[in-house]
């Protein structure tokens, strides 16, 4: 138990790893590029699943804290066509098996559960050098700090700087881009739009584009206008000029119901572009002593299976469990963890890729309504 566990990245997977290892007396340090927990917005809601995300929260000893943060009723799901006709409607409830939580609340819960000083904020990793026998790595950070790691966990997301130690695989653009917009007080200012969105999440898919929106408890509406466009088109959209940028994006939604177009054309904040990337389905790598990955660093996939955050949480819990069960042979522990990691994530990556095609293929929106009927039946 003498080895220091070094984690790069204070995302969900890295935080769960640190939390569980800390509960069992391991020394852990997390280096995080952001300067604080409040450095940026954390995104929308997550629904945690019984077979992965919830297991991790329980393993971290945080179930009661988690349930107090759940957004009751916001697990409602509705699928409509571009005219606003409802094709599928699943009401929210207090007894959902997939409770919703704000991603920011979940991350803060995990941060607050760690021993003070576990996270080194403002440490952006720039490079990693490996010594002669390949078992010690020196981390170099933008602030000039250097650190040596014998056991290194890459929890640093899609563009991980740790991943190249293990594989040459890099995320590829999926052809889909989300443009995020925000409206405050939807019911008060845009009552017809808020009514169509309902109490939780609205999905309005069609061949080539979609509107995905969520109504929060405070009445605000977060929307992702999804378009299938080339990387060249994406670079041509001028979102530094919000009015011009939104007008360009809105051309993809000509003829859609006014309530849906409002979600695309109006925003109280500058639009945020999120180009969707994914690592190859079935990604794996040869065992490299003392290094492994969790979360998006290990298996970045599109959001169309709803599993990314849940898998990151489970990755952290499973890696910690393996180390706890084999504290005197961490290499064996990582070997066990990765063998199971590769198996469980391939299935979800395949589902994610398949669902992306259903969201934007010629059978949308009917194909999407079918996905939710099967998932929530």
Image (cartoon, helix red, strand yellow):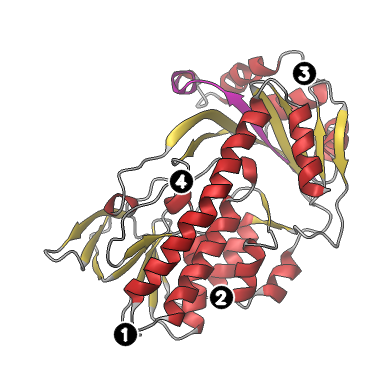
- Can see residue 201? no
Q: Earlier in the sequence, mark 2 or mark 4?
A: 2
Q: x, y (%) of residue 334?
A: 38, 68
On screen, residue 272 above or below 107: above
**Which picture quadrant has residue 294?**
bottom left
On screen, residue 180 above or below 316: above
- Can see residue 352? yes
Circle 3 residues within 10 Å: few <14, some 14–19, many ≥20 = some
The residue at which mark 3 appears reads as 256
Seen at 52% across and 43% down, the residue is 301
The residue at which mark 4 appears reads as 282
Q: Which callout, 4 or 3, points to the residue nearer the camera?
A: 4
Q: Which callout, 2 or 4, points to the residue nearer the camera?
A: 4
Q: Earlier in the sequence, mark 4 or mark 3?
A: 3
The residue at which mark 2 appears reads as 113
The residue at which mark 1 appears reads as 2
Q: Which callout, 1 or 2, points to the residue nearer the camera?
A: 1
Seen at 35% across and 42% down, the residue is 169
Instruction: Tell me the magenta residue range.
Output: 219-235
Q: x, y (%) of residue 277?
A: 48, 37
Q: x, y (%) of residue 11?
A: 49, 59
Q: Is residue 146 left or right of residue 65?
A: left
Q: Earlier in the sequence, mark 2 or mark 3?
A: 2
Give the CA distance from mark 2 to mark 3. 46 Å
């Amino acid at each position: 138990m003498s080895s220091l566990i070094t984690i790069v990245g204070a995302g969900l997977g890295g935080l769960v790893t640190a939390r569980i290892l800390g509960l069992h007396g391991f020394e852990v340090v997390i280096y995080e590029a952001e300067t604080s927990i409040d450095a940026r917005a954390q995104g929308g809601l997550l629904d945690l699943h019984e077979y992965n995300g919830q297991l991790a929260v329980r393993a971290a000893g945080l179930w009661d804290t988690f349930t107090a943060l759940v957004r009751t009723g916001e697990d409602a799901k509705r699928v409509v066509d571009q005219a606003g006709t409802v094709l599928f409607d699943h009401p929210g409830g207090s007894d959902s098996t997939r409770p919703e939580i704000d991603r920011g609340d979940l991350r803060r819960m995990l941060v607050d559960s760690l021993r003070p000083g576990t996270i080194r904020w403002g440490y952006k990793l720039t490079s990693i050098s490996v010594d002669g026998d390949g078992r010690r790595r020196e981390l170099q950070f933008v602030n000039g700090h250097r650190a040596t790691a014998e056991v290194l966990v890459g929890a640093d997301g899609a563009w991980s700087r740790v991943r190249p130690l293990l594989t040459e695989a890099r995320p590829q653009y999926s052809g889909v881009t989300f443009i995020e917009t925000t409206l405050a007080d939807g019911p008060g200012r845009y009552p017809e739009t808020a009514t169509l969105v309902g109490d939780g999440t609205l999905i309005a898919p069609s061949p080539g584009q979609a509107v995905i929106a969520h109504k929060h408890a405070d009445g605000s509406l977060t929307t992702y206008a999804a378009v299938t466009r080339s990387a060249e088109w994406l670079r041509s959209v001028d979102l530094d000029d919000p009015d011009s940028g939104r007008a360009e994006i809105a051309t993809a939604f000509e003829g859609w119901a006014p309530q849906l177009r409002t979600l695309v054309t109006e925003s109280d904040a500058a639009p945020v572009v999120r180009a969707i990337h994914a690592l190859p389905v079935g990604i794996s790598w040869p065992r490299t002593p003392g290094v492994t990955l969790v979360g998006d660093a290990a298996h970045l996939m599109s959001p169309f299976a709803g599993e990314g955050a849940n898998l990151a949480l489970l990755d952290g819990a499973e890696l910690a469990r393996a180390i706890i069960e084999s504290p005197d042979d961490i290499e064996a522990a990582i070997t066990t963890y990765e063998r199971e990691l590769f198996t469980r994530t391939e299935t979800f990556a395949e589902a994610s890729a398949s669902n992306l095609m259903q969201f934007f293929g010629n059978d949308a929106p009917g194909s999407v309504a079918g996905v939710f009927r099967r998932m929530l039946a």
